[in-house]
Image (cartoon, helix red, strand yellow):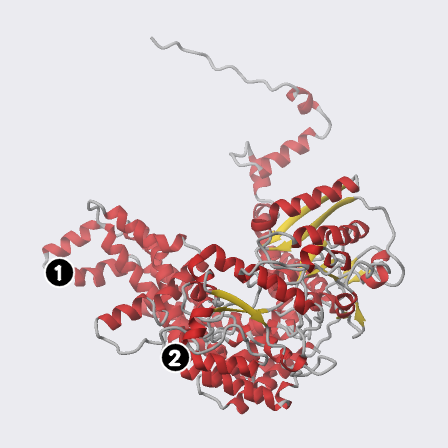
Amino acid sequence: MVATQTAKPVTVPGAEAVASAPGASRIRKLARAVLPGPAPGANGAALYRRWWLPWLWTAPAIVCAAVFGVFPFLNTLLLSFTNAKPLGGAASFVGFSNYTRMLGDADFWLATRNSVLYAVIVVPLMVLLPLLLAVLVEKNLPGIGFFRSAFYTPVLASSVVVGLSWQWLLADDGLVNTWLEKAHLIRSAIPFLSDSWLILLSAMGLTLWKGLGWYMVFYLAALGNVPKELHEAASMDGAGAARRFWHITVPGVRQAMMLVGTLTGIGSLRVFTEIYMLGSSTGGPGGADRTLPFYIRDVGLDPITGNAGYGSAVSVALFVLTLGLTLLAQRLTKEDES
Amino acid sequence: MRTGRLTGSMVGIVVLTLTAAGCGLSGSSGDSDSTAGGCKVDKGNVGSGKLTGEVKGNITFQTTNLKKDFGTFFNGVIKSFEKAHPGTSVKWIDDPGDATFGQRTVADAQACTLPDVLNVDSPTATALTKAGYLLNLGVKDPDAAKPFVPAFWKSSTMKDSSGTLVHSVLPWYTGGVLLTYNTDLLKKAGIDPAKPPTTMFGLFADYEKIAKKADGKYFATMANPVWRIPADWDQMNIKTLSADGKSAVFADDPRTAQWVAWMAKLYKEGAMPKDSLSSNSDPSTLYSQGKVAYGSTNPSFVRFVKQNSPSIYAKTAVGQQPFDALGHTTAAPQYIAAAATSKNAPTALAFAEFLTNAENQTAWCKDPSVVIFPTTSASLDDPFFQKTTGDDPFSQARKLVAEQLKTATAYQTNISTAVQNAIVGQVQLAMQGKKSPAQAVKDAQAKANELLKQAG
């Protein structure tokens, strides 16, 4: 037998005193305006339409964006027109001289080439390979959890540990060269860690290997939204696995692919650790593998000889490059969709 | 109306942000007359006059990668200081001292949040002194020099923003430099381990003998020139920079190109692992595996071998560093500095002097697991550092370093990491045969000068 209870009004100690206090009406109005819940009557609805209310809700986000995003960006932009030093001190405006120096700087163009090359090679592979991996581990087979975990493990490892592991793998007497020699595929060791092109390609391999598991999880979530009925219907119509992949799976995860492409593009242009781990502090022999962030560190951040002004100008160039490539990718995707 | 408000709000945000950015650009945190490196500080911290004030309050003390091995010792020092100065509290921060240490220090300095007392190496101290972030100890405590070996104190100077040499650091411990080698591998190559070479090129000739004998089975040393520039050039008395430090001059000395030619030859002949040309790895691992004949020049490297590879330790011997044209070593010590931006500068200075006093330096340098020596006169009189007995590599290392410290100075070429990388990069290209040694040296000087020019 269930006892029926009558709801009693809940009284809060001191509430009556507050309600009758001077200014309580204003407090109630403000509370109605800022707290969620239905507005009692027309007065509340009017409060909801206050012009400043959206700004109030978004203020924390705006402040964070301004402090951690807009302010550093504008500061960098201003610094790029100065000869400021990393440790402060007097800085004077130098006009566009940092930008004109940049245009004639062969090392800047080499770093730009490496960064663009990194993005051009890594982004398509990073968009496609994790998707294939996700399709492979999507099915609920016995023991599939082990493979999902195994593919995700590199994501959890620190970049330094991963870098050291790859050094051991790619050394002249490392695992890869030893296997290739034992298989009689090569006569002498492939100079993965001393040839500038191979260092760059190895660094790309490291980025891909470390990112596969992360983006695989993105795609696993996206694949859950692709209707299984479409696959079943296509199968009944005689479509093979490859055809179903291109015509059902890929369109179904297009939004996720765009996101992965954008994130990977930005990440590729900002790569530093992989080059440092495989090419040391010089960025490969002769600095031939330096990317733009590497170059910014060398010219802008050194406490003794750094020029924060020039480093900032290169940072602005990196920003423009990142923005340009992102917009280009979006435009190409839109054209493809239309 | 709504559009107007939106525009107004956006303009307000942009104006506020630009104003803030402008403040950041100026690098100043206030409009006080007393500033250090752009930070507002107590008047007593800068300018002329002895630093006065009560020793009390909280300070931070930063070391680099010492907590793991020496945590007990430093906690003891901190407790003793706090006991001797009631009302003080020292918070110890141990930075890992990795590749981004310099950048973190710069960020701390810019934000006016440098630790009150910090352990710095020579390049970092140079940068911080130039920008005015460190207390001028020669002025703030005229007695600061008293405990130290005069040669070390005299040579432990940095240039301030006007180019004047000032004492902004206290000398701490020094390690010296030594040759550490695998006697078996040297004997195989026909080298007498008891007679180490006295010149750099003599050492290179021994490397060549090893390369010819080893035929790729083992190596003499590591290839990356980053371990040798500018230390080798200092030892050969090759001037890397001009007297005012504003331009590179190493290419003017013909021995620099000869040095690069030697490196290129040794690399080609297999004296060094090919994949170590641009590797971060020092010889520690390969030496411990018996694959490299010469180990690190850091005397405490012997401890590493003893702990990690007893079989190789049994074959290890140490020899004096080739003094070459310089005639002595440049044992630049580690330094302790007090930040001019400290809010408790008297306490910071007191702790810095307490940490580096003879008693504490002696206690630490007697640690049996390290080969380090104190820089205070009273410590060096201790029999522990004067009479070393034993024939094991560890005892021999102590003996050799003690011998070299009799004539050593702290003078060391201070080049920035960026300049070092620029020079090293060109030498690497010469070693790969992509440039002639002469061209590489010329290009290295041009690149170094480009960086020095932008530093002003």
> Which x, y percent locates residue A84?
69, 72
- Does residue A51 show up? no
Above or below, A303 against A230 in this view is: below
Circle 1: is it few (<14), some (14-19), or many (20+) Cα within 10 Å?
some
- From the top left corner, tell me how far across and down residue A293 is, in percent: 52, 70
- Disc 2 designates what residue? B213
* Disc number lying in front (1 or 2): 2
**Image check: B353 left or right of B76?**
right
Residue in the image at 41% along x and 76% along y? B274
Q: Residue furthest right?
A: B49
Query: Image height check: is A2 above or below A153?
Result: above
Q: Secondary structure at mark 1?
A: loop
Residue A42 vs residue A243, the one in the foreground: A243
Mark 1 sits on what residue?
A: A239
Chain designation of label 1: A
Quadrant containing the N terminus of chain B is bottom right
Q: Secondary structure at mark 2?
A: helix
Instruction: Please state which amino acid type lies under the numbered disc 2.
Output: Lys
Q: Chain of mark 2?
A: B
Q: Quadrant of residue A184?
A: bottom left
Contact between labelled residues 2 and 1, with CB atoms less than 8 Å apart: no
Q: Quadrant of the C terminus of chain B?
A: bottom right
Mark 1 → mark 2, Cα distance in angstroms: 66 Å
Residue B429, numbered label = none
